[in-house]
Image (cartoon, grey):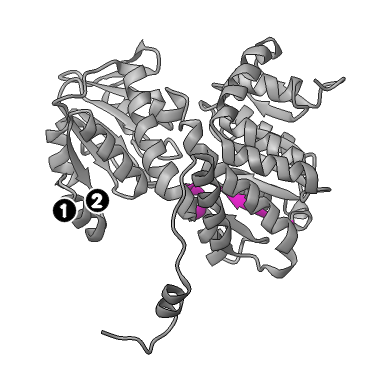
């Protein structure tokens, strides 16, 4: 434990013992990140870096931050969502790891951005974002500090969308690696992690029986695929809404019903958004939803359900009926919103299992190492995770699981790298 505490704003430092225990449990399920941390401690590839991490402050994130610190970075942390912070973890980061942390579960919007500002006050040289709030605020509110930043990484789909928009506008002023786009991230974290943890969050909040329920999933990207498959696995009847004809056909051929939002509003009993867009379920849909319908969001921001319109339709008749469940009384029917429409798997549960985040945060750590070494060669744009890093993460995960795979023979390598061979 550090002899003196770093700058921080957390809910209760007395929770640190519990946080320390839970961080260690998560770490035992993150062998890839463990191996990277051991190497980082020897090689110190992040020496001199001031890393600002605007991420969900969870047990898994704590182990990523410990890895960055082992690599030589001065680590600063703040929350990327007001309801995703685990207060015991934040306390342990401060007390046990000496990591400056500004994060309090349930913080209001003003405090949320004040915490981001507290991180920026310490002049980071690398950003690590989950949703692009840190990078966006840096560019908009503190342009004089932007040249101090050598590069960044981004964890989530929503953040990558925002960063690409910044790059297209010529507003992005340093290179960012899109960790979200790594195959070992979106194929596993987005699909299996979000799929399982979304079920977990909704069940913790509502305790409903899923078997036989009509569940509508808005969006059939990797997150939507994972959610749909897991709810079907629990016995639910699942329908997909989409705006893109290609994933819509894919959903159909995967065995799901596909319908438009208007039809889905009448059919569904549970509605889950996973699009990264806004007002997916909105004013026109709510009057057609059945009494008792449940709405939840698995997208990064609380914009996918048009809550302002729902509140207007309820004429202020809103009350909390269970922890993380709000009832909106529309007069002839009652609709229920889980976790205020925020990221349900982190707001009403604990987020992804550590075994999945092991790969995602391995990509973050190796992405940070990559940009620390190569930032001078990169332009101010969004870059994919280098394929070599992606494959290394997969290799390390298989090794940790004790699974061996084949390698190609010389004859096979020659065959797949030549054009002369035919039928």
Local packing at callout 2 (Cα closer than 10 Å; few below 14, some 14-19, many 20+) is many
Looking at the image, which is closer to me, 48 or 318?
48
Residue denoted by label 2:
242
Position of residue 250 measured from the top left corner of the image (x, y, whole percent): 21, 55
In the rendered view, would you say 140 is above or below 354?
Answer: below
Where residue 200 sits, quadrant-wise, is top left
Is residue 238 located in the magenta-colored stretch of the structure? Answer: no
Residue denoted by label 1:
253
Position of residue 88 measured from the top left corner of the image (x, y, whole percent): 62, 17
Position of residue 78 measured from the top left corner of the image (x, y, whole percent): 65, 33
Task: Say whether residue 277 is visible.
Answer: yes
Of mark 2 and mark 1, the one earlier in the sequence is: 2
Local packing at callout 1 (Cα closer than 10 Å; few below 14, some 14-19, many 20+) is few
Label ID, residue 353: none
Q: Residue at x 31, y 44 (%)?
A: 224
In the rendered view, would you say 34 is above or below 153?
Answer: above
Q: Residue at x 87, y 20 (%)?
A: 3
Is residue 155 located in the magenta-colored stretch of the structure? Answer: yes
Quadrant of the drawing holding the C terminus: bottom left
Position of residue 54 measured from the top left corner of the image (x, y, whole percent): 62, 39
Q: Residue at x 31, y 33 (%)?
A: 309
Question: What is the CA distance from the residue labelled 2 to the residue labelled 1?
Answer: 14 Å
Q: Nearer the viewer, mark 2 or mark 1?
A: 1
């Amino acid at each position: 434990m550090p002899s003196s505490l770093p700058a921080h704003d957390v809910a209760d430092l007395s929770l640190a013992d519990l946080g320390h225990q839970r961080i260690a449990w998560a770490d035992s399920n993150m062998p890839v990140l463990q191996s990277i941390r051991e190497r980082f401690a020897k090689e110190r590839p992040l020496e001199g870096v001031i890393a600002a991490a605007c991420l969900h402050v969870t047990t898994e994130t704590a182990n990523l931050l410990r890895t960055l610190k082992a690599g030589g970075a001065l680590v600063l942390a703040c929350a990327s969502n007001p309801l995703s912070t685990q207060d015991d973890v934040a306390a342990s980061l401060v007390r046990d790891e000496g990591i400056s942390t500004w994060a309090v579960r349930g913080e209001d919007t003003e405090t949320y951005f004040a915490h981001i500002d507290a991180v920026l006050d310490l002049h980071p040289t690398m950003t690590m974002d989950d949703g692009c709030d840190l990078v966006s605020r840096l560019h908009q509110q503190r342009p004089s500090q932007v040249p101090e930043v050598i590069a960044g990484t981004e964890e989530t789909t929503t953040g990558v969308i925002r960063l690409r928009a910044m790059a297209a506008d010529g507003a992005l002023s340093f290179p960012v690696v899109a960790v979200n786009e790594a195959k070992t991230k979106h194929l596993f974290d987005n699909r299996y992690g979000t799929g399982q943890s979304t079920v977990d969050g909704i069940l913790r909040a509502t305790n409903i029986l899923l078997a036989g329920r009509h569940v509508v999933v808005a969006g059939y990207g990797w997150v939507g695929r994972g959610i749909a498959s897991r709810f079907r696995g629990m016995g639910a009847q699942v329908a997909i809404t989409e705006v893109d004809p290609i994933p819509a056909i894919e959903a159909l051929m995967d065995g799901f019903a596909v319908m438009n939002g208007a039809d889905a509003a009448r059919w569904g009993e549970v509605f889950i958004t996973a699009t990264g867009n806004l007002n997916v379920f909105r004013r026109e849909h709510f009057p057609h939803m059945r009494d008792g319908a449940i709405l939840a969001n698995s997208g990064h921001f609380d914009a996918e359900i048009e809550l302002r319109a729902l509140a207007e339709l309820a004429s202020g008749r809103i009350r909390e009926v269970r922890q993380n469940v709000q009832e909106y009384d529309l007069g002839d029917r009652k609709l229920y919103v889980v976790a205020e429409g925020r990221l349900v798997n982190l707001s009403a549960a604990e987020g992804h299992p550590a075994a999945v985040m092991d790969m995602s945060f391995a990509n973050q750590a190796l992405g940070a190492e990559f940009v620390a070494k190569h930032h001078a060669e990169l332009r101010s744009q969004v870059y994919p995770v280098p394929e070599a890093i992606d494959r290394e993460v997969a290799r390390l995960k298989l090794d940790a699981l004790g699974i061996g795979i084949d390698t190609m023979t010389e004859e096979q390598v020659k065959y797949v790298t030549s054009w002369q061979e035919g039928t």
